[in-house]
Amino acid sequence: MILGISHITFIVKNLEKATTFFEEIFEARGVYSSGEKQFSISKEKFFLINDLWIAVMEGEEIEKNYNHIAFKIDESDYDMYLEKIQNLGLEIKSGRKRVEGEGNSIYFYDYDNHLFELHTGTLESRLLRYQREEI
């Protein structure tokens, strides 16, 4: 039986830039840094975003694609997050076409081409909207 997500790992070129990214955008709390030690495949850092364990490990840059992780935000925080992203000079990707009622999103790349989304909607609201005939 699956109990939930254990952790999410991102491969990054620069652990310090990744630290800035996760701390500034997600207010992540650093809980571990391997320093020069290597217990896994490379040097790594662990963060907590609320109770979600995020691991970052040194490695090669990836190519941009649409694979992404979306974090839920409140609609009232949309502009605040947009400003945080802009202040770090991150690339903001144009969002896909949306239908009314499925929420708003900010898509943006971290320093290593991972795509993130901050989304104001819920699964329930999206499914309800998709069930309507006007789509």
Image (tube, helix red, strand yellow):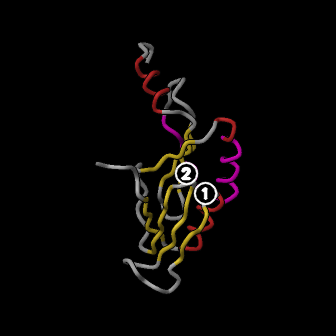
SS category of the residue bearing label 1: loop
Mark 1: give few (<14), some (14-19) or many (20+) Cα within 10 Å.
some
Q: Residues within 10 Å of mark 2 (few under 14, many from 20)?
A: many
Disc 2 target residue: 108
Looking at the rendered structure, the secondary structure element under dot 2 is: strand
- Placement of 37 over or under 26, stated as above or below: below
Relative to 103, 57 lies left or right:
left
Q: State the residue lying farthest toward the top.
A: 133
**For residue 87, side relative to residue 70 (left or right):** right
Label at residue 90: 1
Work out how far the residue at label 2 is from the one at label 1, CA to CA, in angstroms: 7 Å
Q: Magenta includes 85?
A: yes
Which residues are the magenta region? Answer: 78-96
The amino acid on which the numbered mark 2 sits, given as a three-letter code, is Phe
Residue 103 in percent (x, y) is at 55, 31
Q: Position of residue 37 (x, y in %)?
A: 46, 86
State the image quarter where residue 48 is shown.
Answer: bottom right
The answer to which quarter of the image holds residue 60 is: bottom left
Q: Are marks 2 and 1 in contact (CB under 8 Å)?
A: yes
Q: Image quadrant for the C terminus?
A: top left
Residue at 45% across, 14% down: 134
102 in the magenta segment: no
**What residue is drawn where x is 46% and y is 50%?**
69
Residue 74 locus on image (x, y percent): 63, 38
For this orientation, the residue located farthest to the bottom is: 36
Horizontal side, residue 84 vs residue 57: left or right: right
